[in-house]
Image (cartoon, helix red, strand yellow):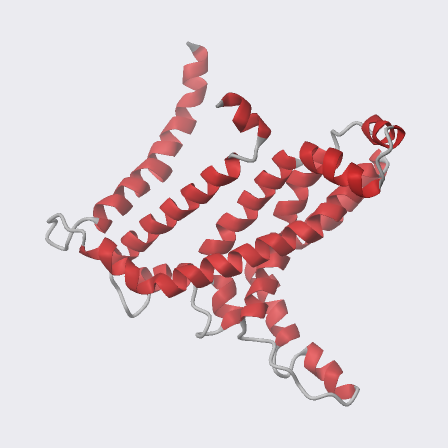
C-alpha cells in the first residue's frame, strides 16, 4: 500500500504532462475551430511528404554516422582501466554541459562563409566553400549534439561484456573480425538499439539545428510543426495533425528496432 503512495507523484506527472498533451494533440488533429470532427488536417499532411522524407533521410544518416563513430569509442572506453573510464566519460559528456543553442552557434561560426574553416582555406590559397545552410551542416549538427546519446548506451552494455569471451573466441580460432561480428556485436545489440532510438527520435524532430545550420532550404518536420504553432502560418490543428503523424512514424520505427533487441524477443 505504501508503494502506491510513493508512485502517486509520478502518476500525476504522467497524467498532467504526458497523457493530457497527447489527448489535446489528438483532439486538435481531428477537429475544426468549431469543434466538429474532421480528417481534413490529417489528409493535408500528405502535401508535406517531401519534408517527412527529408527529415527521415537526414536523421538516418546522422544516426548511422553516430553509430559508426560511437561504437569504437564505446569499446575503447569499456576496455580501459576503471580509474580512467570516469575521466574519459566526463570528456565525452563535457559538451553536454554547455547550452544547446551555444553549441549550435559555435558551429555557425565554424562553418560560416567567413568562418574559421573558410578562413583557413583562404590562408592556404583555396577558395571558400559553402558549408553553412546545407544538408551536410544539418547532419553535422545532429551528430555533434547527439553523439553522447549513442556512446553512453553502447558503453554501458560493452562494459559488462566479460573479457574472457574474447580469449575464448581467440582460442576457438576466431580472428579480430570474427570476434567483432560473432561476439561483440551480438552482445552489444541492446546498446545499439537503445543508442539508435535515443539519437533518431530527437534528430527527426529537431528544429533548432535545421534552422540555424540548414537555412530555409532544409526545412524539417520540427520546423514545420513550429511554424504551425508559433510562425506566421498559424494553424494549431494542422500542427497537431503533423505531430500525430510524426509520433506514429516514431512508434513504428521503435517497434521495428525492438525486434532486434534479444530481451524484447525473449519477452515476446
Is residue 68 among what the camera can see? yes
Q: Position of residue 230 (x, y in %)?
A: 33, 63
User: Which residue shows up at 32% across the image and 67% down it?
Assistant: 231
| Direction from residue 102 to residue 165 in the image, left or right | right
User: Which residue shows up at 31% across the image and 41% down it?
Assistant: 22
Between residue 94 and residue 60, name the one nearer to us.
60
Between residue 178 and residue 64, name the one nearer to us.
178
- Which residue is situated farthest in the front direction here? 173
Q: Position of residue 112 (x, y in %)?
A: 61, 78
Q: Quadrant of the N terminus?
A: top left
Between residue 9 and residue 151, name the one nearer to us.
151
| Direction from residue 198 to residue 32 in the image, left or right | left
Is residue 133 placed above or below 236 in the rendered structure?
Answer: below
- Which residue is situated farthest in the top direction here? 1
User: What is the count of numbered marks?
Assistant: 0
| Direction from residue 30 to residue 131 in the image, left or right | right
- Which residue is situated farthest in the right direction here? 171
User: Which residue shows up at 28% across the image and 53% down it?
Assistant: 241
Q: Position of residue 108 (x, y in %)?
A: 59, 72
Between residue 196 and residue 173, name the one nearer to us.
173
Is residue 8 placed above or below 101 in the rendered structure?
Answer: above
Residue 88 picture quarter: top right
User: Which residue shows up at 73% across the image and 35% down it?
Assistant: 182
Is residue 77 among what the camera can see? no
Q: Position of residue 69 (x, y in %)?
A: 70, 53
Residue 41 picture quarter: bottom left
Is residue 140 placed above or below 250 in the rendered structure?
Answer: below
Amino acid at each position: 500500500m505504501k508503494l502506491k503512495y510513493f508512485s502517486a507523484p509520478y502518476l500525476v506527472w504522467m497524467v498532467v504532462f504526458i497523457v493530457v498533451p497527447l489527448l489535446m494533440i489528438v483532439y486538435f488533429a481531428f477537429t475544426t475551430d468549431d469543434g466538429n470532427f474532421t480528417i481534413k488536417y490529417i489528409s493535408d499532411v500528405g502535401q508535406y511528404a517531401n519534408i517527412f522524407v527529408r527529415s527521415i533521410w537526414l536523421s538516418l544518416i546522422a544516426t548511422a554516422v553516430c553509430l559508426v563513430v560511437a561504437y569504437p569509442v564505446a569499446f575503447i572506453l569499456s576496455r580501459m582501466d576503471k580509474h580512467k573510464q570516469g575521466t574519459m566519460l566526463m570528456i565525452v559528456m563535457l559538451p553536454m554541459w554547455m547550452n544547446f543553442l551555444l553549441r549550435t552557434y559555435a558551429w555557425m561560426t565554424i562553418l560560416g562563409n567567413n568562418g574559421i574553416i573558410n578562413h583557413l582555406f583562404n590562408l592556404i590559397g583555396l577558395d571558400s566553400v559553402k558549408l553553412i545552410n546545407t544538408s551536410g551542416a544539418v547532419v553535422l549538427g545532429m551528430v555533434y549534439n547527439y553523439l553522447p546519446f549513442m556512446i553512453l548506451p553502447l558503453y554501458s552494455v560493452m562494459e559488462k561484456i566479460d573479457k574472457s569471451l574474447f580469449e575464448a573466441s581467440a582460442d576457438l580460432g576466431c580472428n579480430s573480425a570474427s570476434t567483432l561480428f560473432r561476439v561483440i556485436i551480438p552482445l552489444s545489440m541492446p546498446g545499439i538499439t537503445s543508442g539508435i532510438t535515443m539519437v533518431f527520435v530527437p534528430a527527426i524532430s529537431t528544429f533548432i539545428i535545421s534552422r540555424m545550420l540548414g537555412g530555409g532550404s532544409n526545412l524539417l518536420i520540427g520546423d514545420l510543426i513550429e511554424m504551425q504553432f508559433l510562425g506566421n502560418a498559424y494553424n494549431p490543428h494542422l500542427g497537431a495533425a503533423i505531430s500525430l503523424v510524426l509520433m506514429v512514424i516514431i512508434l513504428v520505427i521503435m517497434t521495428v528496432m525492438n525486434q532486434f533487441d534479444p530481451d524484447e524477443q525473449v519477452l515476446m
